Amino acid sequence: MSDSELDTVTPKVLVQYTIYAPGGDEVDHRAYDSIQPQGTVGDTMLHDAEVIGYAEFEPYTQLDRHLDVHEFKAEIEEKAEYFHWK
């Protein structure tokens, strides 16, 4: 990949994380999201974040947070210039 191509993509780390019910250790739900490589997923209820892939997108590509892994993967594979699942 050339330097000019690197300037035209936005890298994202693809993560799965677990949200616990307030006040307990019971799992409320799992969610799937993309974050900047240097970023964090900030949520006081967040536990067990796991990297599940990497993708590159055109700048300003909008991505949704998903509760269903299949919907998340479909959106990534549709919008990404490049992706790799762990």
Image: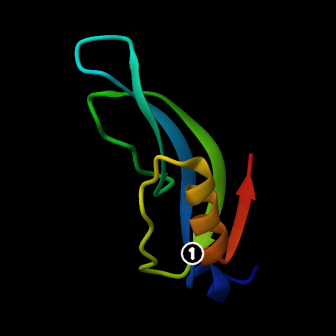
Residue 57, quarter of the rendered image: bottom right
Q: Horizontally, is 57 left or right of 66 in the view?
A: right
Label 1, on which residue? 57
Closer to the camera in the image, 21 or 45: 21
Q: Position of residue 70 (x, y in %)?
A: 63, 54
Query: 65 and 84: which one is in front?
Result: 65
Q: Residue at x 74, y 58 (%)?
A: 84
**Quadrant (top left, top right, bottom left, bottom right) of the N terminus:** bottom right
On the picture, is 20 further left or further right than 23?
right
Q: Residues within 10 Å of mark 1 (few under 14, many from 20)?
A: some
Q: Which residue appears farthest toward the left when viewing the image?
A: 23
From the viewer's perspective, is residue 41 above or below residue 27? below
> Is residue 28 toward the left or the right of residue 44 in the image?
right
Residue at 29% across, 36% down: 43
In the rendered image, residue 78, in percent from the top left (x then y), is placed at 63, 75
Question: 80 and 20: which one is in front?
Answer: 20
